[in-house]
C-alpha cells in the first residue's frame, strides 16, 4: 500500500515544531505501525534526512514505551491495542495518516514523538507500593485472597503506564492511570495497612501535575488494556473515605 | 589459562551450603551502610530487586537505566510464570526436585551449588512477591494457583494470567520507587552505561552517557552490580525488546571480566513465525500454551489444505509420538529442534512454510472455551492482533526463535565477576541454567539474585572496605574512560557511509542465525568467523549515522550497541566451535545420537568455558572451571 504521513517534527524541548509530510509507498499490510516507521526512517537516513525519533522497546504491547496520536487517536484506531501491536491492515491504500506525540503539559516533548513521562514515576513513588522489607514476608498462603478480588486487582494491575489515558483526555487528567495502581493495591488484603495514606498521597501528586477528571471516558477508550472507569469511581470513594479515616486512631477499613 | 577461577563454593552438604555461606560471610552494621556507595546498572527483575533491597538496607544506591522508567525493562515481557518448590499441589514437588529438574534440564552444564541455592530461594520469592501485592492467580479457596511447564512433571509454576513478568517487575519497581521516595536510591533514567572503570584491579565505577543531552559522566562506587540482561539481539530477530543489548557486559569483558559459555543460547519453541522481510522482532507465545495445545504438522509434505480439512490420521503429533512421557511438554531445546526438523523436512505450515501448528481444539472440546480463555485469553488476543487469525477456530502457527542467553559474565558463587567489586545478576551472568533454561526459571533467578543473593554477598565484599572511600571520579582512569567514550561517539558520527545501522544489524543476525543458531557445525561456524569480521569492517567504513551526539540520537545509541554485538558474535562462534559436543541449546550436528538427540561429551567438556579478553585483534584466552556432579548423576537426558 502507498501512504502519506504527516508527522510532528521537533528538534528539542525548547524548539518550535512543525508537521512534515512524507510519501511512504510500498508498505505491506503485515507490517506493524512501528515497522512502517522503521521503513520510513531507513529511507530517510539513506536520503540524508534525520530519522523520526519515537519510543518503542518490547513491541509486544507490554512495556508501555510506545505511544503516539494517530489521526488524533491515542494508539490509533484499533481498540485495546498499543501502537506497536497495531498493524497496517487497519489502514487502506492511499490513506493520509497524521502522527503526533502525546499532547499533555505534564508530558513535555523531548524530540519528535518522544515525550517525558516521569511524572508517572512520581505518582508511584508517592505510595504506589506495599512496603515489605525483603525477607520479612510471611508464608504466602497464610493470606487468602478471594479469587474475585485477585482477578479485579489484576484487571487494574495490568496497566502498562503508556500515558494514552492522559493524551486522550481533554483535560490531560491522569485519573485512570492513578486509580488503576491505587485500586490494584487497595483491593488486596496486603494493601490495607497503607491504604488511606497511599490514597491521599497518590492523589495529591497526581493533582500537582495533571488536569481534573470530568468523566469524559476518553481514557478508557484509548487504553490499550481497556482498564475500566470503575476504578476511577473506586479511587474517588477511597479518597473521600481517606480524608476521614487517615487519622492515627481510626485507621480501620 | 591465566585467570584464577575460584568458584568459592562453600563446604558442607549441598542443602547447607547457602546457610553456611551466609553465616560465614561478613556483615556491615546498619550505621555503617550509608558510608558505602553502590551502583546498580539495569532495572529489570534482578536490578530493581537488588537496588530496592540494598537501598532498604541503608546503602547509598544509584540505579541506572536507559529506559524512561525502570518499569520498562524487558523482564516485563515474560509471560508464563515463575517456578517455586512450594508443593502446594501436593504432587511430589520439593526443593530437591526443583534442583534436580534444573540441573538435568540444563543438560549438566550448571554448578550444582548455585542451582540448589536457587531452588531453596524460590520459596522465599513467592512469599516476598505475594506480600508486595503481586496479583498471582488464585483458586476459589483464595489459595495460590499453579500450573505445569515444560521439562517438569509437577505443577510448580505461579502465574499472573499471561503477564507474570509484568506483575513481578511492577512489584520490584514499586519497591524501588519506594526507596527513591525514601531517598536511599538515586534513580538515573535515560542514562546508559558506556564503560566500566577498573583501578588497581578492582572496580572503581562506571562512565555513562545521558541519552537526551549526550552528557558523558563518571560515577564512582565501592561496588557495581550489572543486571543488564541478555544478548539474544545479536541475532537481530529475537523475542527480546529492541533496545536489549550486550554493551554493559561486553565493556566489562573488555576490562577483564571473564565471559562464561557465550555460545549457550536458548531458542524458544513457541513464537509467531516471521511474516515478511521487514519483521523487526519476533513475538513469543508463552510456553504455558503447550499445557493445553497439541503440536502437529500434516503427514503429507507440502500439504496445502487448511488445517480443519486435514483428518486426524493425516496429522503427525510428532512430540507426543517421539516423547510419550513428556509429550508436548518436553524442554525448550528438544521442542525447538523437533520443530526445525519438521520444517526442514518440508512439512512446515503457513504461507511461508515456516511454522508448525499449536492446536487448542481438543482442549476446547474437553474444557470448554471459557477455561481456555481464562488461562490464555490475552495471549490468544495478541496472536490474533498480529496474524489476523483466530486461534479458537484455526490452530496457531508457531516456530522457534532466539529467546534467552544462558551465557553471560562468569561469576563465582557470590555472583562476583573476575573483577573484584563487579557483580552480575540475572540474565547478565552465566550462572544457573547450564546449557538450557527451563521455562519459568528466568524470573526465579532474576529475583533470587536481586532480592536475596546480591544483598548478602555485597555486604561480605564491602565489609573489608569500611575505611576506604571510593576512588574519586577525578582519578585519571575515569578521565581516560570518558575520553574513550567520547572518541567512540565521534568516530561513529563521522563515518559518513551509506548504510543504516539496522541494515548491518540485520545482516549480522542472518549470519548468526544461519551458522550459530539451532544447529551448528565446524563448517558453519568457520564460515561465520570469516563473515563477521568482514561485515564488521564494512560497518566501520560504511555506516551512516545522522545528527549529533549532544541530543537524543537513536541511531547513535543503536550503532554503539551493534558495534559491540559484532565482537560478541565472534566470541560466541569461537566458543561454539571449541565445544565439540552437543548439550542443551548448543547443538553441534557432528555430535548427535542415531535418533538425532544431543550427545554430550562429559569426559572432555564438563566445564564452564570462561573466556578472557586479551586485546583487540588477539584471540581470546580460554579458562576452564571444571564442573562436578556429586548429587545429580550425569546421565543422557531422556524425555521419552
Image (cartoon, coloured by chain):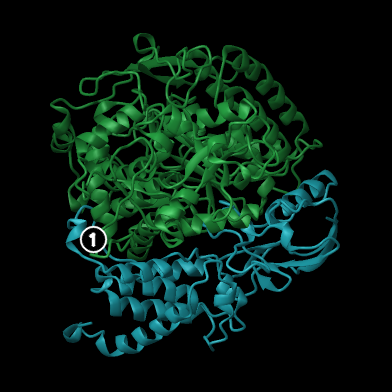
Can you tell which chain is drawn green?
Answer: B
On-image quarter of the N terminus of chain B = top left
The image position of residue A235, as x and y in percent, is 39, 82
Residue at disc 1, secondary structure: loop
Residue found at x 42% / y 68%: A155
The image position of residue A212, as x and y in percent, is 52, 86
Q: Is residue A14 above or below residue B98?
A: below
Q: Nearer the viewer, residue B480 or B297?
A: B297
Q: Nearer the viewer, residue B174 or B307?
A: B307
Q: Nearer the viewer, residue A96 or B132?
A: A96
Query: In screen coordinates, is B294 left or right of B357?
Result: left
Q: Is residue A98 above or below residue A197?
A: above
Image mark 1: chain: B
Residue found at x 46% / y 78%: A206
Bin the neighbour count of mark 1 within 10 Å (Cα to Cα): few under 14, some 14-19, many 20 and up.
Answer: some
The image position of residue B230, as x and y in percent, is 48, 38
The image position of residue B550, as x and y in percent, is 66, 51
User: Residue B83 appears in which quarter of the rendering?
Assistant: top left
Residue pointed to by mark 1:
B143
User: Residue B28 appears in which quarter of the rendering?
Assistant: top left
In the rendering, what colour is chain A?
A: cyan
Q: Is residue B57 visible?
A: no
Query: In screen coordinates, is B476 left or right of B430?
Result: right
Query: In screen coordinates, is B79 left or right of A163?
Result: left
Count numbered badges in the picture: 1
Residue found at x 50% / y 32%: B336
User: Residue A185 appears in which quarter of the rendering?
Assistant: bottom left
Q: Is residue A154 visible?
A: yes
Amino acid at each position: 500500500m502507498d501512504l502519506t504521513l504527516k508527522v510532528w517534527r521537533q528538534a528539542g524541548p525548547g524548539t518550535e515544531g512543525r508537521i512534515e509530510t512524507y510519501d511512504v509507498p510500498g508498505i505491506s499490510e503485515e507490517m506493524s505501525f512501528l515497522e512502517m516507521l522503521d521503513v520510513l526512517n531507513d529511507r530517510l537516513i539513506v536520503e540524508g534526512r534525520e530519522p523520526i525519533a519515537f519510543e518503542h522497546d518490547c513491541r509486544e504491547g507490554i512495556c508501555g514505551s510506545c505511544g503516539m496520536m494517530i489521526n488524533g487517536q491515542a494508539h490509533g484506531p484499533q481498540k485495546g491495542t498499543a501502537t506497536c501491536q497495531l498493524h497496517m491492515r487497519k489502514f487502506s491504500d492511499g490513506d493520509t495518516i497524521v502522527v503526533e506525540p502525546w499532547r499533555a503539559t505534564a508530558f513535555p516533548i523531548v524530540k519528535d514523538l518522544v515525550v517525558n513521562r516521569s511524572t508517572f514515576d512520581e505518582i508511584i513513588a508517592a505510595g504506589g507500593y506495599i512496603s515489605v522489607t525483603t525477607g520479612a514476608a510471611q508464608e504466602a498462603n497464610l493470606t487468602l485472597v478471594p479469587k474475585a478480588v485477585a482477578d479485579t486487582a489484576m484487571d487494574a494491575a495490568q496497566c502498562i503506564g503508556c500515558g494514552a489515558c492522559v493524551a486522550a483526555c481533554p483535560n490531560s487528567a491522569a485519573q485512570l492511570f492513578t486509580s488503576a495502581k491505587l485500586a490494584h493495591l487497595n483491593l488486596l488484603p496486603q494493601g490495607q495497612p497503607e491504604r488511606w495514606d497511599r490514597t491521599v498521597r497518590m492523589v495529591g501528586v497526581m493533582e500537582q501535575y495533571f488536569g481534573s477528571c470530568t468523566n469524559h471516558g476518553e481514557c478508557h477508550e484509548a487504553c490499550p488494556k481497556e482498564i475500566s472507569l470503575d476504578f476511577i469511581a473506586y479511587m474517588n470513594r477511597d479518597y473521600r473515605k481517606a480524608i476521614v479515616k487517615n487519622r492515627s486512631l481510626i485507621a480501620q477499613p | 589459562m591465566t585467570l584464577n577461577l575460584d568458584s568459592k563454593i562453600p563446604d558442607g552438604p549441598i542443602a547447607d551450603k547457602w546457610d553456611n555461606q551466609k553465616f560465614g560471610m561478613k556483615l556491615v552494621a546498619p550505621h555503617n551502610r550509608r558510608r558505602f556507595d553502590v551502583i546498580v546498572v539495569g532495572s529489570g527483575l534482578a536490578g530493581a530487586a537488588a537496588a530496592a533491597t540494598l537501598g532498604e538496607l541503608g546503602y547509598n544506591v544509584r540505579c541506572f537505566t536507559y529506559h524512561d522508567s525502570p518499569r520498562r525493562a524487558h523482564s516485563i515481557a515474560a509471560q508464563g510464570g515463575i517456578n517455586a518448590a512450594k508443593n502446594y499441589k501436593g504432587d511430589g514437588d520439593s526443593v530437591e526436585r526443583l534442583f534436580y529438574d534444573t540441573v538435568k534440564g540444563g543438560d549438566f552444564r550448571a554448578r550444582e551449588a548455585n542451582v540448589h541455592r536457587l531452588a531453596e530461594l524460590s520459596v522465599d520469592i513467592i512469599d516476598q512477591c505475594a506480600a508486595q501485592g503481586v496479583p498471582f492467580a488464585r483458586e476459589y479457596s483464595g489459595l495460590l494457583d499453579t500450573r505445569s511447564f515444560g521439562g517438569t512433571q509437577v505443577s510448580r509454576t505461579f502465574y499472573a494470567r499471561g503477564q507474570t513478568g509484568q506483575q513481578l517487575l511492577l512489584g520490584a519497581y514499586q519497591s524501588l520507587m519506594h526507596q527513591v521516595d525514601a531517598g536511599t536510591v538515586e534513580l538515573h533514567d535515560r542514562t546508559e552505561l558506556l564503560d566500566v572503570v577498573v583501578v588497581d584491579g578492582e572496580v572503581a565505577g562506571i562512565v555513562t552517557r545521558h541519552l537526551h543531552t549526550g552528557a558523558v559522566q563518571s560515577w564512582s562506587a565501592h561496588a557495581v552490580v550489572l543486571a543488564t540482561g541478555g544478548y539474544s539481539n545479536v541475532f537481530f530477530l529475537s523475542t527480546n525488546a529492541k533496545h536489549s543489548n550486550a554493551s554493559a557486559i561486553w565493556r566489562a569483558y573488555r576490562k577483564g571480566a571473564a565471559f562464561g559459555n557465550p555460545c549457550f543460547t536458548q531458542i524458544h519453541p513457541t513464537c509467531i513465525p516471521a511474516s515478511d522481510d521487514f519483521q523487526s522482532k519476533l513475538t513469543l507465545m508463552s510456553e504455558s500454551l503447550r499445557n493445553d495445545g497439541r503440536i502437529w504438522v500434516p503427514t503429507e509434505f507440502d500439504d496445502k489444505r487448511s488445517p480443519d480439512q486435514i483428518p486426524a490420521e493425516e496429522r503427525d503429533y510428532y512430540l507426543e509420538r517421539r516423547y510419550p512421557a513428556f509429550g508436548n511438554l518436553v524442554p525448550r531445546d528438544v521442542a525447538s529442534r523437533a520443530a526445525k526438523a519438521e520444517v526442514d523436512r518440508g512439512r512446515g505450515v503457513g504461507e511461508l512454510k515456516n511454522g508448525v501448528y499449536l492446536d487448542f481444539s481438543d482442549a476446547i472440546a474437553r474444557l470448554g472455551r471459557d477455561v481456555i480463555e481464562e488461562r490464555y485469553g490475552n495471549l490468544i488476543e495478541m496472536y490474533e492482533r498480529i496474524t489476523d487469525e483466530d486461534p479458537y477456530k484455526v490452530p496457531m502457527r508457531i516456530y522457534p526463535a532466539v529467546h534467552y542467553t544462558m551465557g553471560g559474565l562468569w561469576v563465582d558463587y557470590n555472583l562476583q565477576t573476575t573483577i573484584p567489586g563487579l557483580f552480575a545478576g540475572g540474565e547478565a551472568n552465566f550462572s544457573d541454567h547450564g546449557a538450557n533454561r527451563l521455562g519459568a526459571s528466568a524470573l526465579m533467578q532474576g529475583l533470587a539474585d536481586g532480592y536475596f543473593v546480591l544483598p548478602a554477598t555485597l555486604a561480605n565484599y564491602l565489609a573489608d572496605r569500611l575505611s576506604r572511600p571510593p576512588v574519586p571520579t577525578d582519578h585519571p582512569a575515569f578521565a581516560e574512560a570518558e575520553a574513550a567514550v567520547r572518541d567512540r561517539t565521534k568516530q561513529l558520527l563521522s563515518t559518513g557511509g551509506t548504510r543504516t545501522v539496522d541494515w548491518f544489524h540485520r545482516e549480522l543476525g542472518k549470519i548468526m542465525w544461519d551458522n550459530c543458531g539451532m544447529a551448528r557445525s565446524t563448517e558453519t561456524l568457520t564460515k561465520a568467523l570469516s563473515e563477521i569480521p568482514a561485515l564488521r569492517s564494512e560497518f566501520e567504513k560504511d555506516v551512516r549515522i545522522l545528527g549529533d551526539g549532544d541530543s537524543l540520537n537513536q541511531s547513535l545509541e543503536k550503532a554503539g550497541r551493534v558495534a559491540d554485538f559484532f565482537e560478541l558474535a565472534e566470541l560466541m562462534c569461537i566458543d561454539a566451535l571449541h565445544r565439540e559436543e552437543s548439550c542443551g541449546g548448543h547443538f553441534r550436528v557432528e555430535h548427535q545420537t542415531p535418533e538425532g538427540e544431543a550427545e554430550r561429551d562429559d569426559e572432555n567438556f564438563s566445564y564452564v568455558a570462561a573466556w578472557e579478553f586479551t586485546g583487540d585483534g588477539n584471540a581470546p584466552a580460554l579458562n576452564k572451571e571444571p564442573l562436578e556432579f556429586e548429587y545429580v548423576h550425569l546421565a543422557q537426558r531422556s524425555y521419552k
